Every structure is written in C-alpha cells, then in structure tokens.
Image (cartoon, rainbow, N blue to C red):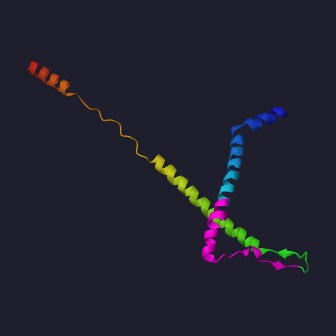
Amino acid sequence: MLNEFKQFIAKGNVMDMAVGIIIGAAFTAIVTSLVEDLINPIISLFTGGLDFSGLGLALTEGEEAAVFAYGNFIMAVINFLIIAWVVFLLVKMVNRIKEMAENEPEEAPAEDPGPTEKELLMQIRDSLAKS
C-alpha cells in the first residue's frame, strides 16, 4: 500500500496540482493585498469611505446578542467582485501578451541571393564560346 501511495504521489498530475495550489495561494495573497491596500482606498475616495461591515440586525438583546451581520456579507460580495475584475484584467493582459508572442512575425527566410557577378560572367562567357 505504501508503494501504491508513492506511485500516486509521484505522478505528474498530482505534483502539478500541488504546485498549482501553492502558486494559487501565493497569488491570492497578492490579489487580496492589491484590492485591500490599493484599490479599495481609491474607491473609498469616490464613495466617501462607505463601509457596510458595521451593518447588522440584532436578533436578540443584551451584551452577547446574536447579530445578523449582513453588512459583512455585502462587503465580502463587493470585495469578491473587485477581486474577480482584477483577476479578469490580469488574465486578459497575460493572454494578450501570449497572443502577441505567438503572432510575432517570424523572420523571413533569406532569399536565395542567386548567382554572383563572377558566376554570371562565366555563364555569359560559356554561352558565347558555344556559339
């Protein structure tokens, strides 16, 4: 059973998936920082610093009241939409760069320079000699 597990782990698909998950986690941190630290402050300039995270409906009374915190959900949806838009733009940019690299014109093969001047003169000489 241990050998089967080793074979399973050693397969390319599992290793590729593991690398993808690790890179995805690192990329998530980058995109989250981009949104929270750079994009959200710019948006708050235009919206007057709207923050829905404090919105909620108290379901019970008292210090330990249960709160239906719909404001946090609204903020999560807004952040998701911003992150999705940023990722969309990044993917679009990467695809455009790949497309430009694929469509880059290949160097035209060098044209056959043809016979040199010396070769042409030799052909003319030979043609005249035959006549």
- Residue closer to the observer: 21 or 6: 21
Residue 11: x percent and y percent? 72, 37
- Residue closer to the observer: 91 or 33: 33
Q: Is residue 41 visible?
A: yes
Q: What residue do we see at 53% from left, 56% from top?
A: 93
Q: What residue do we see at 29% from left, 32% from top?
A: 112
In the rendered view of the protein, which quadrant contains the C terminus? top left
**Where on the picture, by quarter, is residue 34?**
bottom right
Q: What residue do we see at 68% from left, 67% from top?
A: 79
> Does 40 sit left or right of 72 as displayed?
left
86 up-or-down from 124: above or below: below
Residue 91: x percent and y percent? 58, 56
Count the numbered circles shown: 0
Is 35 one of the magenta-colored residues? yes
- What range is drawn magenta here? 33-59
**Where on the picture, by quarter, is residue 12?**
top right
> Does 2 sit left or right of 13 as displayed?
right
Residue 130: x percent and y percent? 10, 19
